[in-house]
Image: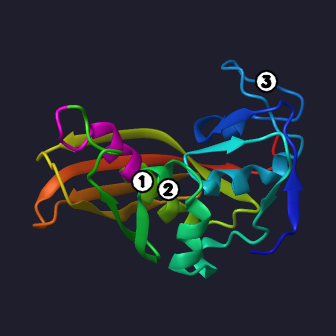
Amino acid sequence: MVDARRFTTLREEVVVDAFHLSTLREGVVDARGFSTLRSSPLLPQLWAVGLCCFIGKEEMNIMPDLAISDMSIEAVNRFLADSLVGHLGMEILELGQGRVRGRMPVDRRTRQPQGALHGGASLAFAETLGGVGAAYFLDLERQFPVGVEINANHIRAVTSGYVVGVATALHIGKRTHVWEIKLFDDQERLTCASRFTQAIIDIGVG
């Protein structure tokens, strides 16, 4: 990974939530109290790390070229690893125009106390697949996707093994993407069906 860009935070430690990236500007703190970054053009790089990025006081290195369509599957997974995506054991298996396939383990990280796959983990997985799929279409130096709405039907409980997710583009517009994500158990039975809408945000506007 090329060490080409650096950033520093305004506080010793902050959390940057992907849902708030569009509101972050230099010198501004949003209503939930997240510190902003000094270099707003780095927002797409932060988004691509995953649903959230934990930033320490020291400077961190950011991959300079985030053309998802030009990255290998291995590179995409390495880049997403240091985030919620890696913490829950998610991995991308296939990535192409309008379709993403991945898997997530059903284990102590993703189960609810009763032993079944947590619905929130299913939604996080669905949103990850849809977000990576949307990023495939974008020049992340100019635009990045943020989730605005997600819904899901939990159809079948899963207690072990993996769930495999397939995200398919339903609508690819200039300002919005709509993706359908279906999750399946090891017997290829449908466990969750989700629809995810994303807004496409321009960098450096406003």
Q: Which quarter of the figure has residue 2?
A: bottom right
Crowd class of label 1 (few under 14; some 14 to 19; many from 20; radius 10 Å) = many
Dot 1 or dot 2: first in sequence order is 2
Residue 196's place in the image compared with 23, above or below, is below
Q: Please indicate whether residue 32 sits to the left or right of residue 176 in the image.
A: right
x, y percentage for residue 106? 26, 52
x, y percentage for residue 108? 30, 45
Tell me which segment is drawn in magenta: 114-125
Label ID, residue 178:
1
Q: Residue at x 27, y 39 (%)?
A: 118
x, y percentage for residue 161? 20, 60
Which amino acid lies under the numbered mark 2 shown in the image of this protein?
Gly
Which amino acid lies under the numbered mark 3 shown in the image of this protein?
Val
Which amino acid lies under the numbered mark 1 shown in the image of this protein?
Val
Q: Which residue is mark 3?
A: 29
Dot 1 or dot 3: first in sequence order is 3
Q: Nearer the viewer, residue 108 or 198?
A: 108
Between marks 1 and 3, how big is the CA–CA gap? Answer: 30 Å
Label ID, residue 69:
none
Label ID, residue 86:
2
Q: Please indicate whether residue 122 sits to the left or right of residue 140 in the image.
A: left
Dot 3 or dot 2: first in sequence order is 3
